[in-house]
Image: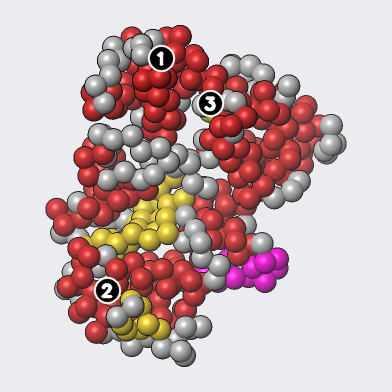
């Protein structure tokens, strides 16, 4: 197993998630899935694993991302391109594209007919029809659909109209070709909370929620053990437990990050990792030169919520980060009370913000108190924004 910080992993570098795979394939027998997972959890790695093992479940699978799409046409192009370029299904796609008039496979990949490039709706429906009328069952995995929705929303009222039309179209596409084609939609921003905010929950009510969390403590310790063995490093069980507890939430990305820098410190110092070295790495990665590992958490509030909600969410987090045990709902209501006097409006906003912050991995509710899930992020937030 190799260190892979921030990149999806495949093959021998993929670890665990056996129960999640079994559960996903069981649900896909009759449902489309909405994978709900905060950033860095490893959702893309799991999606790639499902695609790699799809033939064992009598399906052909394809994966694409809508993260960089700026229009509905871009999204449909991504679907066509994914089908055209995935080598493991090349023979299937040749027969598939023979039945599609909107595009053709050229030497340089997808070639759209000029008239079809702007008719994304018709082209997408033609693709769905071709998939469903063939002899094969398919799984189409789309990552970062919520990012595309947010991109459209930035276009103002016209963007909101486009979001509504696109999500209803995609729902119709799923329902029309349900028997042959199953969909898995995912994103690091919760599509469920985003749709609820826009009053569009009915556009995704055919999707079965599929929550994906971090490793449990035992899996996290085994993960660190396998990494250590791969690099000839000794991490006894107590030290692995210390690492997991110090990180606070065993997200694969942050476990990899900790291990990578532990290995670096061990090589440079010539001594084996120990508890003091874990603390040294913890502090090192909170320094100025490593803020990119944590800054995104603040930036994504603006991307997902916009102002003033992003600023209000940041105020809540700045209050919560002061204690490992978090804050009560009543105390958080008082934080918003400085700017929102109406009690009903304040409670409604607080409920919404806490739902977003919980579903996106910032917070966890324990015994009526909201606390940071990731200890590393809590300490970063306290020092960066609440000092």
Colour scheme = secondary structure
Q: Which of pointers 3 and 2 lies earlier in the amino acid sequence?
A: 2
Q: Is residue 251 left or right of residue 291?
A: left
- Residue 276 x, y percent position in the rendering: 45, 9
Q: Nearer the viewer, mark 3 or mark 2?
A: 3
Based on the picture, tell me whether residue 28 belongs to the magenta stretch.
no
SS state under label 1 = helix
Q: In this picture, which residue range is highlighted in magenta?
A: 155-166
Q: Residue furthest bottom?
A: 115
Q: Which of pointers 1 and 2 lies earlier in the amino acid sequence?
A: 2
Q: Which of pointers 3 and 1 lies earlier in the amino acid sequence?
A: 1
SS state under label 3 = loop
Crowd class of label 3 (few under 14; some 14 to 19; many from 20; radius 10 Å): some
Q: Which mark is residue 269?
A: 1
> What is the spatial separation of the Cα atoms under label 1 and label 2, in whole angstroms?
57 Å
> What is the spatial separation of the Cα atoms under label 3 and label 2, in whole angstroms?
48 Å
> What is the spatial separation of the Cα atoms under label 3 and label 1, in whole angstroms?
17 Å
Q: Is residue 277 above or below residue 117?
A: above
Question: Which residue is tagged 3?
Answer: 285
- Residue 256 x, y percent position in the rendering: 39, 30
Are the two marked residues, 3 and 2, in contact with CB atoms closer than 8 angstroms?
Answer: no
Question: Which residue is tagged 2?
Answer: 131
The answer to whether residue 19 shows anywhere in this view is: no
Q: Which mark is residue 323?
A: none
Q: Nearer the viewer, mark 3 or mark 1?
A: 1
Asked whether 314 or 172 is in front, the reply is 314
């Amino acid at each position: 197993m190799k260190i892979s910080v921030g990149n999806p992993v495949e093959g021998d570098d993929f670890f665990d998630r056996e129960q999640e795979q079994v559960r996903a394939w069981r649900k896909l027998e009759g449902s489309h899935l909405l994978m709900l997972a905060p950033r860095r959890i490893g959702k893309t790695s799991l999606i790639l694993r499902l695609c790699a093992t799809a033939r064992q479940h009598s399906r052909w699978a394809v994966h694409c991302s809508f993260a960089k799409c700026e229009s509905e046409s871009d999204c449909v192009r991504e679907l066509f391109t994914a089908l055209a370029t995935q080598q493991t299904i090349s023979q299937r796609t040749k027969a598939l594209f023979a039945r599609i008039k909107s595009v053709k496979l050229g030497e340089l990949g997808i070639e759209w007919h000029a008239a079809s490039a702007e008719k994304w709706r018709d082209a997408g429906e033609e693709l769905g029809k071709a998939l469903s009328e063939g002899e094969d069952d398919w799984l189409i995995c789309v990552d970062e659909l919520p990012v595309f929705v947010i991109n459209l929303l930035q276009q103002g009222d016209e963007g909101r109209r486009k979001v509504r039309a696109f999500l209803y179209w995609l729902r119709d596409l799923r329902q029309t070709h349900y028997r042959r084609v199953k969909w898995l939609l995912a994103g690091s921003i919760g599509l469920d909370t985003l749709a609820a905010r826009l009053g569009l929950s009915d556009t995704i009510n055919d999707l079965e929620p599929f929550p994906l969390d971090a490793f449990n403590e035992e899996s996290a310790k085994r993960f660190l053990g396998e990494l250590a063995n791969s690099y000839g490093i000794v991490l006894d069980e107590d030290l692995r437990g210390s690492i997991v507890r110090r990180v606070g939430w065993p997200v694969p990305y942050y476990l990899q990050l900790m291990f990578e820098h532990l290995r670096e410190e061990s090589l440079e110092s010539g001594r084996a990792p120990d508890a003091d070295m874990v603390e040294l790495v913890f502090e090192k990665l909170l320094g100025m030169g490593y803020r990119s590992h944590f800054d995104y958490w603040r930036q994504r509030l603006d991307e997902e919520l916009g102002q003033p909600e992003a600023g209000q969410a940041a105020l809540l987090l700045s209050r919560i980060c002061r204690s490992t045990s978090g804050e009560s709902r009543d105390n958080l209501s008082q934080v918003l009370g400085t700017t929102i006097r109406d009690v009903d409006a304040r409670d409604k906003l607080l409920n919404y913000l806490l739902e977003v912050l919980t579903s996106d991995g910032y917070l966890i509710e324990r015994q009526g108190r909201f606390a940071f899930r990731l200890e590393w992020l809590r300490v970063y937030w306290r020092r960066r924004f609440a000092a």
